[in-house]
Image (cartoon, rainbow, N blue to C red):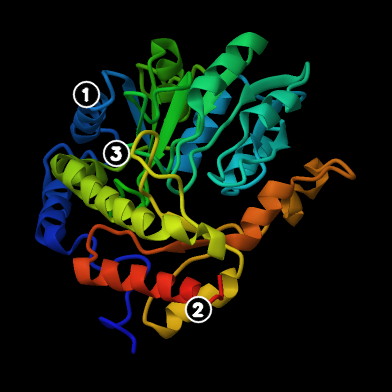
Amino acid sequence: MTGPGTIPFFAPDLFEEDREVLLDLVRRTGTAGEQKFILGERTAAFERALGETLDGAEVVACSSGTSALTLILTAMGVGPGDEVVVPAYGCAPLGNTVANLGATPVFADIDPVTMVVDPAEVEAAITGRTKALLPAHMFSVMADMPRMREIARRHGVRLVEDSAVAQGGVLDGRPAGTWGEAGLFSFVQVKTFGTAGEGGAVVTEDAELARVVRALRNHGQEGQRFVHQRVGCNSRFDEVQAAFQLHRLPGFPARLERRARIADYYTERFTPLGERGVVPPPPGRNGRCYYVYSLLADERDALREHLAAHGVSSHVYYPAPLPHQPAFARFAPPGRQWPHALAASRRQLAIPINPHLTDAQVEHIADTVCAFAAAGRG
């Protein structure tokens, strides 16, 4: 029995309710008299509105989350000879952005359950060449930012918060994106505040850093057009996307709450399965984000096949730690091991958590996982 049809991992109808609005915004932007398609009034309004949700932090919209990270590191002066401590398990931009600036990504192992970078491993990786620490929130859990802040302060290094997947998360009353000297969001469609395309944002309470990032995203221009104070790039934000995100911002809390409720239900159902080899994220909402819901399963591939046979799509993220990837092999010291990152790459499996899931679909997904574990296949 396959339950209520095939349940996709990513909802194909995320923007169906907003289709007419989006089409109208395209028309209005395209026919407006000022013919301003990038970095116009809509972008500025979106930056202000998003900043109001982040305790007044400055927001600089840009072309993607990866670009936001590059802009931050560039503004901080990261370059050749510098080291940046990054998680050994995560998305490629953690290493790409550092390496593309001529700096060295230094990989730190992760916590075996939460899959976020282990603060003790981060501190052990700091050397006299370390310029910045780059913890990343992962899947359902924010990194331990209080400890990261303390480590960065004690060693006198910069702290950048990769909060690309964590918009809407809150840790100890402080929003994701505001713990480091700068943070960032990604608006790619499957993120919690995704849009119908690509986009990102830099978040910071440092006015000078924000000023530099604003110039960098627009070819190094600041104030006067065609006058370039610094070497920059093209990481500008689209006016249609800005207007669309402004339209969707009021509904973001409700969509996020739906994701959180699904996560609460999953965790309640799956917590007893730990001794059977299926481990969910820790319970609770403090320091949680709801981009994807990831399990750790001893028999990951068998669970994935079982879910597929019962009409549930799932997703394997990062099938190898970053230092095991060919692109980053030159940054992996001989003999160095990252055992928890390697274990996560072999056990991680994400199940659907998008806000368009029905209660029946959520229950079917949970039932299917529990049946797998009950059969002794965990």
Among the two numbered marks 3 and 1 on one chain, the one whose residue lies closer to the N terminus:
3
117 vs 109, left or right, is left
Q: How far separated are the C-alphas under marks 3 and 1?
A: 22 Å
Mark 1, residue position: 52
Q: Measured along the vertical axis of the image, is residue 372 above or below residue 116?
A: below
> What amino acid is at disc 3?
Ile
199 vs 76, left or right, is left
**Of circles 3 and 2, which is in front?**
2
> What amino acid is at disc 1?
Glu
Viewer-proximal residue, 176 or 63?
Answer: 176
Mark 2, residue position: 375
> What amino acid is at disc 2?
Ala
Viewer-proximal residue, 209 or 277?
Answer: 277
Residue 262 location, quadrant? bottom left
Does residue 12 appear in the picture of this structure?
no
Viewer-proximal residue, 283 or 310?
Answer: 283
Q: How far separated are the C-alphas under marks 2 and 1?
A: 49 Å
Mark 3, residue position: 38
